[in-house]
Amino acid sequence: MRVLGLMSGTSMDGLDCGIFEISLNSDYVFSWECVDFNSISYSENMRHLISMALDGNSDCIRDVDRKMGKEYSSITEKFIRGRKVDIIASHGQTIAHVDGVSTLQIGDVKYLRESNKVPVISNFRQADIKANGNGAPLMPFLDWLLFQKNDNDTITLNLGGVANITYIPKSGIRGEVLGFDTGPGMALIDEACKLYFGERMDKDGIHAKIGKVTDEVLMELSTHKFVQKTPPKSTGRHEFGRGLAERIISKYSEISPEDMIKTFCVFTANSIAENINKYLNFTTSDCHLIISGGGVHHPVLMEEILSWSILSNITTSNDIGINPDMKESLLMAVLGVAKIANIPANMPSVTGAKEMVVLGDILN
C-alpha cells in the first residue's frame, strides 16, 4: 500500500509527512520504501494554539482540535501535490496521556478525509489501553519489524521531545521485546531556549557548548520519580516540559542560561543511560545502539550520550538507511497498514496489555 504517515511528536514543532510503500502480512513479513519525506514546521500561531490546548479547558481543546485538523489538511495537500495514496495514518498531537487510564490526541481527521478522499486511520493508543496496557510507547512495534532478524541484541533510542528506547533481543522473539520512555529527550533543552532566548531550540548546541554543569541542579533532576520508575512506563511534557523547566530555572535563577542548558543536556543523557543500564538485559560486547529523532542534530547531547553509555557500538539510524527525522512518520504508515490488514500491532511485553490487539480507528 502507498501510505501517507503523519506524526506530530512531543517536540510539538511541526508535522512529519512521509509517503511510503508498505508491505506487511499476518506473518509479520515486512518491507518498506520511502517515496518522499519532509518535516514541515508549524506557524508560531499553531505552536501557540497547541500550548493553549495543553493548558486549556474542554472548549479550548475542541477549538484547537478543529484548527489543527484544518492545518493538517492544508499541509498535506501541499506535500502530496496530487500524488495518489491509498490511506493516511495520522497520530495527531498528544495533549494528555495517563498510562493505562486515558489518552487524547488532537487534530480532527475529518478534514484529511474530506480533502484527500481516502480512508484515514488515527487514535492508535486507545485499544491498548482498553486491553489494560499503557497505550504507549508505539515505536517498539516498528523496531521489532525492522530489527527482529539482527544477529545481535539491538537497542533503539528515539530522541524526540521525550526519549524512548526499544530493546530487541537477537532471538527476535516478540514477547521478549522491551520498550519504554526514559525521561526527557529535547523537551527541557527546548523549553529553556524558549524561556531564556525566545528561540525554539538550541540550534547546533550553540548555548550548551559554552555552558558548564551545575551539580546541585543535576542532583535534584536525577531524583525525578519517573527516571527511577520501573517499566512499563511512558511520559510526556506534563512531566518534562515547560512546567519543570520554569520551576528549575526560577529556583536556580543565579545560574546562567548556558549552564542550565548544559545541565539539562547532561541530565537527559544520564537518565537515558541509567534506564538502559538498569532495566535492559544485554551483553555489552554484542549490542548495537541505534539513535534517531531530532535530538541527533544536537552535538552536545549526542556527545553526552556517548560519554555516559557503556556500549561501544553506537550509530544513528542514518547509518542503516533510515533518516533519523523520518522514523516516526514511517511508524504511523506501518500502523495504518496493520489496521487495514487487521494485524495486531501493540506490544504487550512493552505496554503491559493483557493481549495483542489491532490499533487505530478508521474514518472511511
Image (cartoon, helix red, strand yellow):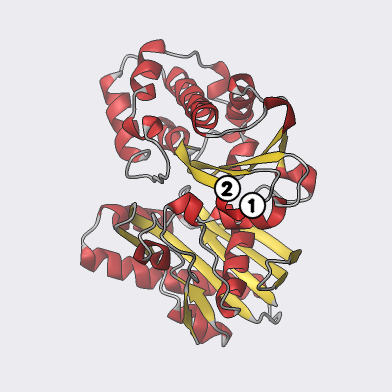
Marker disc for residue 61: none
Residue 135's spot in the image, x, y percent? 41, 58
Q: Is residue 1 above or below residue 217?
A: below
Q: Is residue 259 visible?
A: yes
Q: CA distance from mark 1 to mark 2?
A: 6 Å
Residue 262's spot in the image, x, y percent? 49, 21
Q: Secondary structure at mark 1?
A: loop
**Image point (50%, 71%), residue name:** 358
Identify the image quadrant of residue 327. Answer: bottom right
Identify the image quadrant of residue 257. Answer: top left
Residue 69's spot in the image, x, y percent? 43, 72
Q: Is residue 313 visible?
A: no
Label 1–label 2 contact, CB within 8 A: yes
**Image point (33%, 40%), residue name:** 239
What amino acid type should be assigned to the residue bearing mark 2? Glu
Residue closest to the eye, 29 or 19: 29
**Image point (74%, 39%), residue name:** 152
Whether residue 154 sits left or right of residue 162 in the image: it is right
Marker disc for residue 176: 2
Q: Is residue 340 above or below residue 199?
A: below
Q: Residues within 10 Å of mark 2 (few under 14, many from 20)?
A: some
Residue closest to the eye, 103 or 359: 359
Which quarter of the rendering shows the N terminus? bottom right
Residue closest to the eye, 146 or 74: 146
Q: Secondary structure at mark 2?
A: helix
Q: Is residue 281 above or below residue 222?
A: below
Marker disc for residue 173: 1
Q: Residues within 10 Å of mark 1 (few under 14, many from 20)?
A: few
Identify the image quadrant of residue 22. Answer: bottom right
Residue closest to the eye, 222 or 70: 222
What amino acid type should be assigned to the residue bearing mark 1? Ile
How many marks the image carries: the answer is 2
